[in-house]
Image (cartoon, helix red, strand yellow):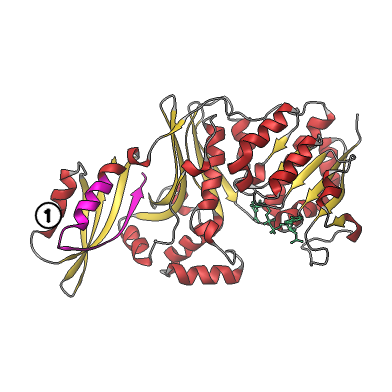
Amino acid sequence: MKDTIRIGILGLGVVGSGTVALLQKNRVSIEKKIGAKIEITKIAVRDLNKKRLVTVDRGLLTNHCEEVLDNPENDLICELIGGVSPAKDYVLHALRNGKHVVTANKELIAKEGHDLLHEAMRRRLDFQFEGSVGGGIPIIQPMKNALGGNEIQEIMGIVNGTTNYILTRMTHEGAEFNDVLEDAKAKGYAETDPSSDIEGYDAQYKIAILSSIAFTSQVNVNDVYVEGITHITRRDIQCAQELGYTIKLLGIANRIGEDQMQVRVHPTLLPSEHPLASTNDVYNAIFVRGDAVGDVMFYGRGAGMMPTGSAVVGDIMDVGRNILFGSTGRISCTCFQQRRMASMDLVETKYYIRMIVIDRPKVLAAIAGVLGDHQVSIESVVQKAHLNDNAEIIWVTHKTKEKNLRSALESIRELSVVLSIENFLRVEE
Ligand SMILES: NC(=O)c1ccc[n+]([C@@H]2O[C@H](COP(=O)([O-])OP(=O)(O)OC[C@H]3O[C@@H](n4cnc5c(N)ncnc54)[C@H](OP(=O)(O)O)[C@@H]3O)[C@@H](O)[C@H]2O)c1
């Protein structure tokens, strides 16, 4: 049996450094657990002179990725660069060279995972990506293994730490979105270009990955509805709180019948006693509902150097064991079905609507009439504030189809007494 697993690493940024630091810190126990030594042969970076978050022998670094990819000694390549290009080419190159691959790259898996997994499967190679969703939270391996006997009905979770941090601070401090965002950037909780987080794309990649595993079907990431948090105001958070709700950015995936699914990302009002409502700051939490197990919740640090390093090292150990026992390529692409993505029009949920109207008799009745005309029934209505001759009205509807709600709002916008529809948001129970 081999006595050493040799790893080449692409990228020594946040996750690369966490991976190397953990392999250094817990080397003895990690090697005992898998029954072989782990050796890092080379680490490719862009800038050889950059200050690193972890201390490594200067001789390990290279700025030629080929030195990592084409080293015949390597058993396994860790892709920790990020993005699709050139990461996809590097991963394909590694697989074609017969190397197992571990990555934390959610964008790559969400967009190209199907092809890459098939390439790995054809070659009986391992291709693992636990760090791509939920940072340090084990979710992909548990869904493929421990929960593998279940038909998964639903996934609902907070899968982006940056937006959760922003919404938590807006909720607790009564702060506005832009003020918290600037502070989050200054503190390093948000990127200089935060669009992937705040526009919901990061969560879109993650829920696409989870739903494809849960529903054993390829999910085209572009079919996943996405709405970020940039339109959430302090006022919405305050009104939601007064109604007993907390606003969170959720990834939601539902199985519909035998051949459809609904996968979406959007800010959602959750009852404040819901466990996801108290998942705060940069923490992530993911509910999975299986037909046998019922509800399971995964909770923990959804990003960061050491948590994500923990996920990558877990994958490295798993691949290492498979190499030692000649059992690589056991679990590969599990998308053996073809489910259609149901249109957002068919989503059926409750809605929160906040609008400003002219404060005069019969206005409520007029709006309620339009809602009724579109089969939208009302659970509650509150008139909040009187500003000059205007009033703010907040409606919570009973469950209704999104299509009905949208057409009702179009008609309501045309009423002369309605000055603005400030926001409408989905409500989960
Ligand atoms: N950060 C997190 O908390 C987190 C959590 C979960 C998953 N992820 C995923 O993990 C991956 C890495 O993220 P990260 O935060 O570690 O990124 P990062 O800090 O920007 O690090 C990227 C690393 O890749 C290197 N690199 C980039 N392009 C390269 C190229 N063409 N050739 C060689 N090296 C190259 C960079 O080199 P230089 O250092 O020389 O510039 C850097 O070391 C991404 O897919 C990300 O989505 C991140």
* Picture coordinates of residue 345, whole percent (x, y): 33, 40
User: Which of 98 and 426 lies nearest the eye of the viewer?
Assistant: 98
Q: Residue furthest bottom?
A: 388
The image quadrant where one finds the N terminus is top right
Residue at the image point whose x is 67% and y is 41% from the top: 129
Q: Quadrant of ligand 1?
A: bottom right
Residue 272 drawn above or below residue 377: below
Query: Is residue 317 shown to the viewer in this render?
Result: no
* Picture coordinates of residue 219, whole percent (x, y): 52, 36
Among the 4 quarters of the image, the one containing residue 52: bottom right
Q: Is residue 330 left or right of residue 60?
A: left
The image quadrant where one finds the C terminus is top left
Query: Is residue 422 shown to the viewer in this render?
Result: yes
Among the 4 quarters of the image, the one containing residue 255: top left
Residue at the image point whose x is 29% and y is 42% from the top: 403
Q: Is residue 221 left or right of residue 43?
A: left
* Picture coordinates of residue 107, whole percent (x, y): 60, 48
The boundaries of the magenta stretch are 405-429
User: Which of 208 and 238 lies nearest the eye of the viewer?
Assistant: 208
**Tally of numbered discs:** 1
Residue 172 drawn above or below residue 371: below
Label 1 beta carbon less than 8 Å to ligand 1: no
Tell me the residue that label 1 is attached to.
Answer: 366
- Going by the numbered disc 1, the residue's amino acid type is Ala
| Secondary structure under the numbered disc 1 in the rendered image | helix
Among the 4 quarters of the image, the one containing residue 324: top right
Q: Is residue 203 left or right of residue 428?
A: right
Residue at the image point whose x is 10% and y is 65% from the top: 360
Residue 13 magenta-drawn?
A: no
The residue carrying pointer 1 sits among few (fewer than 14), some (14 to 19) or many (20 or more) residues within 10 Å by Cα, namely some
